[in-house]
Each structure stands twice: as C-alpha cells, then as structure tokens.
Image: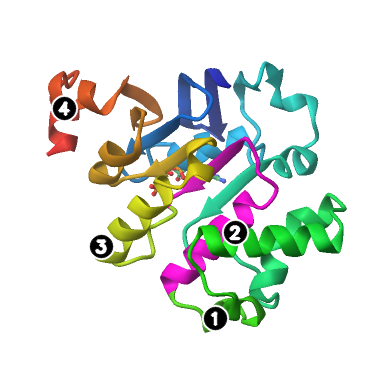
Amino acid sequence: MIHVRHLSKQFGKQTAVNDVSFEVAKGNNLVLLGTSGCGKTTTLKMINRLIEPSGGEIAINGVNVRQQDGPTLRRTIGYVVQESGLFPHYTVADNIAVVPNLLNWSADQIRERILELMQTLRLPETLLNRYPDELSGGQRQRIGLARALAVRPPVVLMDEPFGALDPYTRRHIRRELFELDELRQTTVVLVTHDVQEALEIADQIVLMDKGKIVQAGTPDDFRLRPANDFVRDFLG
Ligand SMILES: Nc1ncnc2c1ncn2[C@@H]1O[C@H](COP(=O)(O)OP(=O)(O)OP(=O)(O)O)[C@@H](O)[C@H]1O
C-alpha cells in the first residue's frame, strides 16, 4: 500500500532523515517511534508532500506521490495532528466538511457523512454548531479525526494525535478509536514517542534515532528480540 524507499531529507547541512525504507500493508498501522528530533515528523510529512524529500521515493498503491501536486494529494490522505489542527473560526460541522466541500460533495451527502461520523465517534450532535474552543481536548481530538476520515481516505497520517491529552483520556480514546471498523480498514502511519502507545496499536513499529532506522518489526519483535542496547533502553 505505502512503499517508502531510501528516503532522506537534508535541512541545510543537517540530515534529518537518512536512508529510511519501510512498507505498510493495506489496513495496517505502522508506528514511527523515537526520541525528539529523530526525524519522525519529517518522514511523515514527506508522505503527503508537506515536505519534499532530498532523496528516495514514496509510492501509494504503486503510484509515486510526486505524480500529483501536493494539495490534490492531500485531499486523498487524512492528516491528524496534536491539538487537532481544527480551524478556530469554523464550527465543528464546517471543520468536518472542509475536504468534502473541496471535493464538491452535495450538501445532503456531507450532512449524512457528518452525522455518521458523529455517531461512530460517539459525539453528540449538539456539538456540531460549536467552535473548537468550546470543546474539551478529547472532543477536539475526535473531531480532528472525524475531519481526517470524512472522505474515507485509504491512508491516514497521525502526528502525536493524542499528545495533548492527559494519560487517562489518551489511553481511553486510543483504545476506542483503534477498535472502530472504519479505522481498521484504513492504512495508518502514526508518529509517537510513547512506547506503550506504539506497542498497543502498531502492526509494525519503525524505531528511529538520529534520522536512521534502528529497528523495524512487530511489537513482539521489539519485546522479544530488541536489536541492540539502544532499543532495550528505549523500551525501558
Ligand atoms: N524546517 C526545518 N528546517 C530545519 N531543520 C528542521 C526543519 N524541520 C525539522 N528540522 C530538524 O530535523 C530534525 C528532525 O525533526 P523532526 O521534526 O522530524 O523530528 P521528530 O522526531 O518528529 O521530533 P519531535 O518528536 O520532537 O517532533 C530535527 O533536528 C529538527 O530540528
């Protein structure tokens, strides 16, 4: 589904991402894990072309992401960030409707999809006319996810999506979300520095340090066969 080959990114003289390769199968969750500054976010943003690589290739369903311009590509890839990234002057309904509107969905189609998402994410419809700052952090996060899932994108990228939440809410929302059928069918690449989060939701984990992959494998590979002392240390 997603093929990343020999990806690298240079910011001036600094190498942020250094020869990173991985694959994500359809419907799987891949977690990019690592300490602050190891290149996770840069890697993620190269998938939807918010950052252009210095080298290497990314293909989604066999098509090089460079074959589409950035904005067109990004309408087909959901994107969830910490603090939800909602537009503060749009209501909840208008926030969820952003991409469907760009894709010229009819008003009826959009309304139906919004109601479906609110139900799926267990959010009361009374929130639809509120503004993001009138929501709790957990509600904002779910609305951010609803917006990312609105047009049923085959791929969703998530950058520390639960980072702004307290540990309890974080665990709770995470479990709930990753059990949704809708998310199970979606191919997800998620960035976190939270080992527990990675072990819980990943089919595959890619652990990075200083721009490079230190180990890639399943949660069990990490638990049972850590590649070296760095991995052992990181897992605690
Ligand atoms: N636009 C930029 N210009 C220059 N350097 C950058 C830029 N974006 C990122 N970097 C540098 O590239 C490196 C990797 O950054 P990146 O944001 O990918 O790390 P990260 O693993 O996501 O970290 P964090 O968990 O703190 O978000 C860092 O050293 C960072 O300072």
- Quadrant for the N terminus, please: top right
Whether residue 48 is in magenta: the answer is no
Q: Earlier in the sequence, mark 3 or mark 1?
A: 1
The amino acid pointed to by label 3 is Pro
Image height of 167 relative to 204, above or below: below
Residue tagged 2:
117
Residue tagged 4:
223
Q: Earlier in the sequence, mark 2 or mark 4?
A: 2
Which mark lies nearer to you, 2 or 3?
A: 2
Circle 3 packing at 10 Å, graded few (<14), some (14-19), many (20+), is few
Where are the magenta residues, as a range? 137-160
Label 4: which secondary element: helix
Q: Residue at x 74, y 37 (%)?
A: 73
Circle 2 packing at 10 Å, graded few (<14), some (14-19), many (20+), is many
Residue 148, image x, y percentages:
61, 52
Circle 1 packing at 10 Å, graded few (<14), some (14-19), many (20+), is few
Q: Earlier in the sequence, mark 2 or mark 1?
A: 2
Which mark lies nearer to you, 2 or 4?
A: 2
Q: Residue 86 occupies which quadrant of the picture?
A: bottom right
Label 1: which secondary element: helix
Residue tagged 1:
133
Q: Earlier in the sequence, mark 1 or mark 4?
A: 1
**Res. 167 mark:** 3
The amino acid pointed to by label 2 is Leu
Q: Earlier in the sequence, mark 4 or mark 3?
A: 3
- Quadrant for the C terminus, please: top left
- Left or right of 109 in this view: 114: left
The amino acid pointed to by label 4 is Arg
